């Protein structure tokens, strides 16, 4: 478990560094599309891991190593959301930005070019990032888990945007795999409960 805590702390440290540097790079630096694309891929890969590890642990309950990996969901989730929020802050602070004003336009929420899905991902990513801490858990109590279920919206809206607007086969395959594994975990848990008489 000690190694998992170290990995978690490394992921959280990288996330903080990204939150500090990414907005400045994105707003004032050289826009390198390949680096930006790589960061979006890291973000989506991280949230895919978050979405897979719990259902896999529920299916394979005898695999203790999977249960231990559930601990890393916070680190990977924060990493994913930090990238998205970092780019979002960069749009807000960039010179001549009209990002905040554009939120109130119809075009911002348009289905054209799948922008609606990108923006829903931005918003849910921000909410998840802000509430992924012990203070939020303490203040929100049982509502904290409800808010964290926004991870499904965050994952699927980001996946739909990447799969269809950016033509990412990785995002499409990831969404299918997560859907199948999550549905399988639900069925397995239901069957276990039936056998146990719950």
Image (cartoon, rainbow, N blue to C red):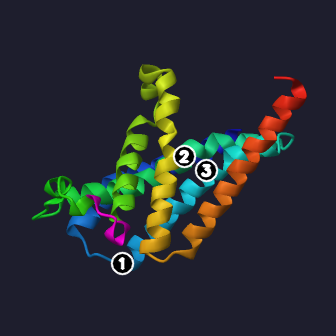
Name the residue: 34% across, 65% down.
111
User: Badge 2, how many Cα within 10 Å: few under 14, some, many 20+?
Assistant: many
The Cα–Cα distance between marks 2 and 1, rounded to whole angstroms, is 25 Å
Q: Main secondary structure of the magenta part?
A: helix
Q: Nearer the viewer, residue 50 or 64?
A: 50
Name the residue: 38% across, 38% down.
130
Query: Can you say which quadrant of the picture contains the N terminus?
Result: top right
Left or right of residue 76, residue 35 in this image: left
Where residue 15 sits: x, y (%)? 44, 51
Name the residue: 65% across, 56% down.
178
Q: Nearer the viewer, residue 34 or 174?
A: 174
Where residue 92 sits: x, y (%)? 20, 56
The Cα–Cα distance between marks 3 and 2, rounded to whole angstroms, is 13 Å
Name the residue: 68% across, 39% down.
2
Part of the protein shown in magenta: 109-114
Evaluate whether residue 47 shows in this view.
Answer: yes
What residue sits right under mark 1 in the picture? 33
Q: Nearer the viewer, residue 56 or 152?
A: 152
Evaluate whether residue 69 shows in this view.
Answer: no
The Cα–Cα distance between marks 1 and 3, rounded to whole angstroms, is 27 Å
| Mark 2 or mark 1, earlier in chain | 1
The circle on residue 51 is 3
Of circles 3 and 2, the one toward us is 3
């Amino acid at each position: 478990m000690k190694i998992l805590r170290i990995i978690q702390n490394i992921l959280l440290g990288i996330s903080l560094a990204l939150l500090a540097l990414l907005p400045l790079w994105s707003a004032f630096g050289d826009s390198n599309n390949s680096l930006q694309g790589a960061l979006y891929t890291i973000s989506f890969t991280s949230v895919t891991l978050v979405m897979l590890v719990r259902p896999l642990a529920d299916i394979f309950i005898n695999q203790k190593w999977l249960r231990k990996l559930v601990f890393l969901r916070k680190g990977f989730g924060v990493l994913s959301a930090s990238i998205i929020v970092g780019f979002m802050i960069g749009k807000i602070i960039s010179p001549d930005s009209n990002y905040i004003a554009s939120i109130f336009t119809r075009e911002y929420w348009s289905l054209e070019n799948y922008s609606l899905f990108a923006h829903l991902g931005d918003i849910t990513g921000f909410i998840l990032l802000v509430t992924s801490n012990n203070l939020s858990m303490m203040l929100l109590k049982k509502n904290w888990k409800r808010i964290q279920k926004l991870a499904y919206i965050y994952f699927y809206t980001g996946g739909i945007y990447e799969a269809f607007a950016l033509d990412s086969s990785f995002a499409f395959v990831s969404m299918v795999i997560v859907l199948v594994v999550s549905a399988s975990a639900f069925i397995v848990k239901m069957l276990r409960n039936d056998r146990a008489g719950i």
